Amino acid sequence: MIAGRSGHTARVALTIIVAALADAGLKVGATYGPGHADLKVRATYEPAQTPTFDLVIRGGLVVDGTGAARFRADVGIRGDRIVSVDRNGIAADQAAQTLSAAGLVVAPGFIDHHAHIQTNIHEYPLAENFTRQGITTILASLHSGSQPWPLDAYMARLKVAPNVGFFAGHSWARTRVIGLEDRAPTAAELEEMKQLVGESMQQGALGLSTGLVYVPANYAKTEEVIELAKVAARHGGIYVSHMRDEATGLLDSVAELIRIAEEAGLPGQIQHHKAVGVTQWGWSEKTLAMIDAARARGLDITLDLYPYTASSTGSSVLFPQWALAGGRQAFARRIADPAQREKIEREMRDIFEKERGGGDLKNVQFRSVGSDRRYDGRTLADLAADRGLPNSIESGIALVIELQLAGGFSAIYHAMHEDDVRRIMRHPVAMFDTDGDPVGFGVGFPHPRSYGTFPRVLGRYVREQQVLTLEEAIRKMTSLSADQIGQPERGRIAPGMYADITVFDAEAIADRATFEDPHQYPVGIRHVIVNGTPIIRGGALTGATPGRVLKGPARQR
Ligand SMILES: [Zn+2]
C-alpha cells in the first residue's frame, strides 16, 4: 500500500512501480482509495504473460538416451535444465527462444570417454573438433604425460564450451615420485604416489587412469596399480586404462585389468578396446567373453572404443620397452652397443610383423616427425623410397631407429580389422571415445578420430551398416556413459535432466575426416546445447562457454 501525499506524486510513484513489476513479469492492478489518499497495489503472478521456457526445441524426434524407441516431442528448457518433454507440443508463446528440429533427431549430448585434453583444453575453449561432433562432455583420462596440478585450481579457472571431467594419472604420479626409472617404488615412494592419487580424488577426479604400455607406467607391476586403484576406490572412483598390451599380450592385459578392478574393489573400464596386429585379429571374441564372465561374477567391467581400424600413438610402441628405459641418452648407448642393437632389432622385427602393420611400411603413417617436418602426413614407405630403400621390415627398423635417436615421432598405425571394431561396438557395455586431441583447424596431421568419431558411428555403423540401432548407439553415447561417471542427471532427455542436447540429421550425419585429409568437420550436426546454452546453433559455433567440470565421486562410497 502506498500512502500518497498528493494524487500527482502517488501517480508518478505508482507508474514507476507498475513498470518495474511488469518488467519482472508480474501483472499489476491498482485501486485508488477514497480521496486518492490511499492507493492499493495488487501484484499477481500470471505465467501466461511470460514465456515458460528459455528455449524450446521444436518438432524433433526424441531419442531419449535410455534405448527407448524414438518419439515426436517438443523439449522445453529453463535455465540449465530440461523441464518439459511434451508429445503434444509446446505453444509458441511459451518459448523465449526456439530452435527448429523438424525432421531431426533430438538426443542427449554425446560423452567422449577419452581424449588428450587434460593439460591443454584451456587453449581450445570452444573445443571445436569435439563439439562439432555433437560431444557435450569430454573426459580427460590420461594414459601418458601429466595431469594439471593442483587439479582443483586448474578446474576452477576453466571456461570452455563442453563439460569436462578429470582423472588422477598413474603415469603422472609415478614420474613425479620416481622419474623415468625402471624399478618398483620403495614403500615410502608408493605412499607418496597414493597421496597424490588421494589428493586428486579429493579435488574432484573421477577415478584413476593408467597407460600401462607407456614409459614409465609399463615399469609398474600390477600390485602397484592395485594399491593406487584402492585409493581411488575409497573415494568412489573408477579405474580406466590403456592396457599394457593391445596386441600379442591382449588377453593377459584384459585379465590384468579385471584383476585390478576385482582386488581394488572398483569398476574397471578398458579404454579404446581393440585387437592390434594381424595375428590378433578376431581376438575380440575372446576378450568380450572374458568381460562377460567377469560381469557374470558381479564385477563391473566395461569398455570404450573408437570406430577406426588404425590407431595413433608415439614411436615408442615400435620398440621393446626395455630399450627406451632411462630416456634418449640411455637408448643411444644401447644402440651403439652391437650386441644390444641386434637384440633390439630382433624384437622390433616381431613388433613390426605381429603388431604394427605387418611388413608393409605404408601402414605406418607419420603424424609428426620433429626432426624432419617434411614427412608429416607421409608414410614410412615414402621415407624408405626417398632413401632408395626397399619397402621391407629391415628398412623400417633402420629408419625408425634413426628417427628415434633424433627424438622420435608420432604416427598412425593401420593394424586393426573392422570385424573386431564392429564386434566390440555391439557389446552392451561398450561406450565411445575419440582418443582425440584438441586441434587447430588445418594444423598438423591428426588421426581423423579427432574430427569424426561420433558422426562416424551414427553414419557408417548405424545408418549404413546397421551394426547398432540408432537408439542403442545413442544409449551408449549418453545414459550408459553418464551413469559410468556418476552423472545420472545427464545423458537423458527427460524433465529434470541437465540440458545437454545434440540435434542432428540421422539421414545425413557422417564423418568427413580421412587419414589423408583429416581436417574436415563432420556433416549433419545442427544444434548442440550444453547446460541449457547453445554452443552450436544451425551448424555454427555461438562462442558460448557454458561447460562445467563434472566431479566425482563416480560411485557411492
Ligand atoms: Zn591410450
Image (tube, grey):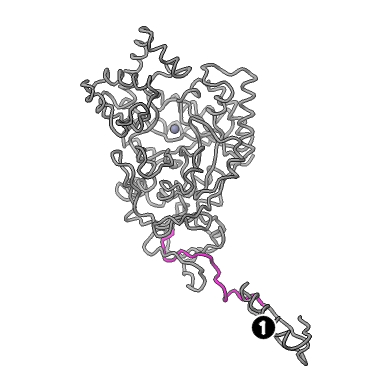
User: Residue type at mark 1?
Assistant: Gly
Q: Which residues are magenta?
A: 44-62
Which residue position holds label 1? 29
**Above or below 269: residue 542:** below
On the image, the x and y values in percent for residue 425 come to 39, 41
Pick the front one: 23 or 183: 23
Decide if residue 140 is on the left or right side of residue 36.
Answer: left
Asked whether 539 falls inside the magenta stretch, the response is no
- Left or right of 5? Residue 93 is left
Residue shown at 31%/37% (left/top)? 418
Q: Residues within 10 Å of mark 1 (few under 14, many from 20)?
A: few
The one of 367 and 436 positioned closer to us in this rendering: 367
Tell me if residue 47 is in the magenta stretch. yes
Q: Residue 486 falls in which quadrant of the image?
A: top right
Residue 52, given in percent of the width and then of the height, sits at: 55, 69
Q: Quadrant of ligand 1?
A: top left
- Residue 526 in the figure: left or right of residue 488: left
Does dot 1 land on a helix, a strand or a loop?
A: strand
Q: Is residue 272 above or below residue 345?
A: below
User: In the rendering, at what x and y percent does residue 192 appear?
Assistant: 63, 25
Horizontal and vertical percent for residue 472? 41, 49
| Quadrant of the drawing holding the C terminus | top right
Q: Quadrant of residue 158?
A: top right
- Name the image quarter holding the N terminus: bottom right
